[in-house]
Image (cartoon, helix red, strand yellow):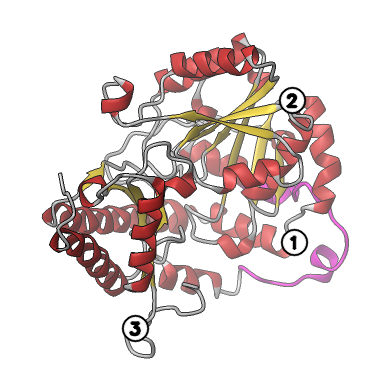
Amino acid sequence: QAAQNEYHPDTNPKGIVNLGTAVNCLMEEELEERLNRDDVFKFQPEKNQHYFIFGGLEVTRRALSEFFGRHLSNGKLLPINELVIMNGVSSCLDSLAFGLVDEGEVIITPTPVYGRIFTDLQDRAYADVQPLHLLPKEYSGTERDFELRPKDLEKRIQELTAEGKRVKAFILLNPQNPLGDICSKEQIMGLLTVCAKHKIHAIVDEIYALSMMDKSQFTSVLSIEHLPDPNRTHFLWGMSKDFGLAGFRFGVIHTRNEELLRYLAVVSMYQATPSIIQEAVATLLNDEAWCDNFFLPTSQRRLTLSYERTVHQLTAAGMTVHQSKAGFYVWINITPFMNQQTITEELEVFEELMAAGVYTIPGSTLHCKVPGWVRIIFTVSENNLDVGLKRFISVLQSRKTKNLKVA
């Protein structure tokens, strides 16, 4: 509905402002300029016309290894034979689900979480994706809202095992979506230690690793020495978020597990990224002057400014916003504007927002256990952001005028 009636300030001012889909529009002109240079898409019959190694061109895997060394792995170059390229991180998740679990076996994910985590792991592999519910601190007794603690993972594994379920894997989104939280090195090691204790695989999805607000500190699992169980620790990244190139369909898996690598080499045939796209990615990542010195720092500065602009408008309207450290989104508590604080009412608010011309993501669709939270994307144009926020705030404030019981 939002896509079919998309807002445009001139041609469709009454259309729907999309603050729901996690795309980054803040660097579109810069990407267009770089991608239209002659060195990016250059068709060469001997390279691009025929079959290739579907799990990744050597030039692209080498570019990834060097890029990760500069940004995520603390200077360490990953062996390129431990990298497998596929057509998007969703395909990577789908392949890992097939390779690591049998039908009905459990993969645990902290929630709230990006909704496709469930579908990517369930749709074809039929994994049993089970939530580890993170809660506001008034419900959980934690120091912070939605805090992820290793002891809670331990407890959840024990609960599921007692129910007769076989837990095979744990997936961690770091940075987290929709919370925007970043796990510390101590948190990561604690979670991986629990996984190692129970001999379960740890999948670490870092697709927002370089989409940080200024001054945020991020520890990639690639940078951690002496992992508790390196053979069962697997890393994911892609071009959709940090580079805003979702249309490239480019994701990568890093694993040291030789058996898994043999399997991925086979299934990559079905989920390959075209060679000309892989070469374009290699060109971008190898251009350090553009990538490291211009694009990424500029993107992070703009992310920060847009985030601050969003938070300022929301808090000025009396709303509570969960502090984000990374990502394209803010996580907003709308319970003060709800009467009964149920999922039904949360979805009613969503429909009211749609009717007012702004598309958001209700927390229940992101598997949040406590009703009354909403995810909003702030990486749209400044005009679209201001219009969308104005509509969002207007709907919620109008609920006060209808004599709802507002806390």
Placement of 200 over or under 353, stated as above or below: above
Asked whether the beta carbons under mark 2 and mark 3 sit within 8 Å of each other, the answer is: no
Q: Quadrant of the C terminus?
A: top left
**Residue 218 in the image: above or below residue 317:** above
Where does residue 385 sit, x and y in percent of width and height?
29, 67
Residue 93 seen by the camera: no
Label 2 sits on a secondary structure element that is: loop
Question: Disc 2 vs disc 3: which is toward the camera?
Answer: 3
- SS category of the residue bearing label 3: loop
> At 41% from the left edge and 20% from the top edge, which residue is drawn?
149
Type of amino acid under label 3: Lys
For the residues marked 3 and 1, what is the alpha-carbon distance in whole angstroms? 39 Å
Is residue 265 visible in the rendered image? The answer is yes
Q: Which residues are magenta?
A: 40-63
**Quadrant of residue 142 within the rendered picture:** top left
Mark 3, residue position: 14
How far apart are the two marked residues, 2 and 1, measured between alpha carbons? 25 Å
Label for residue 257? 2
Q: Which mark is residue 274?
A: 1
